Amino acid sequence: MSKGIYPLFKLILGLGNKDIEQINKTALIYAKNNIQMIDCALSVFEPLKSFLIQNNIDVSKIKFCTSIALLGDVHNKKAKINKNCKRCNKCKDICSQKAIENFNNELKVNTIKCCGCRACEKVCKNNAVDIYEINTYDDDLEQIKSFKKNCSNLIPDVLEVHLSIKKRKKILKEFEQILKIFRGDISICLSRKYFGIEKAIKIINELKELFDKYNKNSEFYVQLDGSSINNANSEYKSNLEALAFLSSVENLPYKFIISGGINDKIIELCKLLNLKPYGFAFGSWARKIAHDEELVRKFVNDTAEFYA
Ligand code: SF4
Ligand code: SF4
């Protein structure tokens, strides 16, 4: 296997997820099963790479990606439990990150583990979960600049830019600022939350034009987000928004990766709809089945067969 084999499998470990033990464990299982891109927070980038090397993974075959989310994008969220909590534990049981913990008879969210998926908010009948926004944008930008200055070999291969915010001009302006400091592969990640399909296509084309101005020799991926950070279960409906987005833009000449709710039902649906995205990005669902290596292997093999 070499970098860039099609279809591309990407593992998303969560922009807000800093739980290095869980990250290492999950990444190792997927790295043993031909995952070609791993997306994690900048701060866990170095320990993860070292851990995989220690476990005999050839990291030169994996593209390492980190994400940056514009302020306002859904990827910068955390949960907090408030005083309405009745300690029924439903949120604790559903949290795929095991981020809800007991502290002196109270439930609290461990923000290091929380990836903002909102599953706890949805399951709580007592209005006891608040979701709030954190701003990591400026810090992440500074870190990318400092990597470059220090000529570190930890510069990500791919920078993913989550830019699902309302203002088109702001998207273009921030994207250009990023392109000025990061030379490498770029993945833009966009949902249809704020745009109709025509506007989404216009923005994708404008972003590609900007990319070509600064970065002609690298890859440009377009990650189509279905339902972002949705704690995906193994069900058909979870995949539909990403596939609907793909079916509207598939004739554009870009490398489309689908994400946001993607699970093991995706290949079946792709067959039915005759769609072959360039790649698949697995987040919540992958982390949930992280311990079932057999299932991971089967899924990767079945998908490769469909593309053969
Ligand atoms: S589901 Fe709601 S009420 Fe139950 S433990 Fe969680 S926050 Fe508290
Ligand atoms: S369910 Fe999701 S949002 Fe809630 S604490 Fe767990 S990771 Fe955070």
Image (cartoon, rainbow, N blue to C red):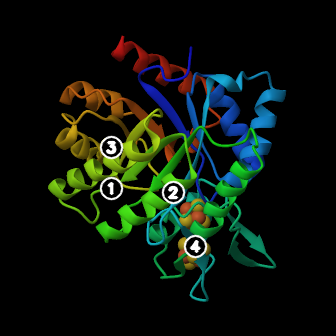
Q: CA distance from mark 4 to mark 1?
A: 20 Å
The label nearer to you, 1 versus 2, is: 2
Specify the amino acid type for callout 3.
Asn
Position of residue 117 measured from the top left corner of the image (x, y, whole percent): 51, 61
Q: Which residue is mark 2?
A: 178
Residue in front for this viewpoint, 129 or 223: 223
Which quarter of the rendering shows the N terminus? Answer: top right
Residue at the spot 58% in from the left edge and 22% down from the top edge? 34
3 or 1: tag closer to the N-terminus: 1
Is 215 above or below relative to 149? above
Are the two marked residues, 4 and 3, in contact with CB atoms closer than 8 angstroms? Answer: no
Q: Which residue is mark 4?
A: 135
Task: Look at the numbered disc 2 and say if its residue's Cβ is closer than 8 Å to ligand 2.
Answer: no
Specify the amino acid type for callout 2.
Ile
Q: Is residue 40 left or right of residue 280?
A: right
Viewer can see residue 260 = no
Specify the amino acid type for callout 1.
Ser
Q: Which residue is mark 1?
A: 191
> Quadrant location of residue 170?
bottom left
The label nearer to you, 3 versus 1, is: 1
Residue at the spot 48% in from the left edge and 34% down from the top edge? 218
Task: Look at the numbered disc 1 and say if its residue's Cβ is closer than 8 Å to ligand 2.
Answer: no
Are the two marked residues, 1 and 2, in contact with CB atoms closer than 8 angstroms? Answer: no
Residue in front for this viewpoint, 89 or 197: 197
The label nearer to you, 2 versus 4, is: 2
